[in-house]
Image (cartoon, rainbow, N blue to C red):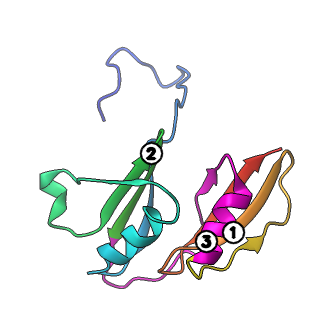
Amino acid sequence: MGGRADRRETDVVTLQAIHHVQLAMPAGEEETAAGFYVRVLGLVQVQKPTHLAGRGGCWFEADGVRVHLGVEPDFRPAKKAHPALVVDDLDELSRRCVDAGIEVRDGDGLDGYRQGYVDDPFGNRIELLEAQ
């Protein structure tokens, strides 16, 4: 897997970050995805590597946040599993969602954060957090 050759099983490995979160989407809906992830959430669509582009789907990122959407032929949205995105203005982002016809649901509380939930155009749950 590309680990250090001198590392033993008992050595501690420190996880450093999450590189990206991948969600599923139906085939052929890349423009719909961009409508939400770019125009509503404010991410930037980035080009997928050439060797992956033929699989469909799309990638979005901004300021160290990366969300990849991959095509699943037997697509079902993630209703429970979800990314939690930290935002700097939950009220403004909630307004943008509502203006785009997207329901914003109140969160059930996470210490130190204001919280809301939205669904992407495919029904995948997205948690929005603003530090208090």
Going by the image, does 28 lie left or right of 63?
Answer: left
The secondary structure type at the circle numbered 1 is strand
Measure how far apart labels 1 and 2 are at the Cα level: 20 Å
The answer to whether residue 61 is magenta is no
Quarter of the image that includes the C terminus: top right
Q: Residues within 10 Å of mark 3 (few under 14, many from 20)?
A: some
Going by the image, does 2 lie left or right of 78?
Answer: left
Measure how far apart labels 2 and 3 are at the Cα level: 18 Å
* Residue designated by label 2: 62
85 or 75: nearer the viewer: 85
**Looking at the image, is mark 1 or mark 2 earlier in the sequence?**
2
Give x and y (percent) for residue 13.
52, 25
The answer to whether residue 15 is visible is: yes
Q: Residues within 10 Å of mark 1 (few under 14, many from 20)?
A: some
Q: Residue at x 37, y 68 (%)?
A: 34
The region drawn magenta spans 71-99
Q: Nearer the viewer, mark 2 or mark 3?
A: 3
Q: Amino acid at mark 3?
A: Cys
Q: Is residue 62 above or below residue 101?
A: above
Q: Amino acid at mark 2?
A: Ala
* Residue designated by label 1: 117
Give x and y (percent) for residue 3.
35, 26
The answer to whether residue 92 is magenta is yes
**Looking at the image, is mark 2 or mark 3 earlier in the sequence?**
2
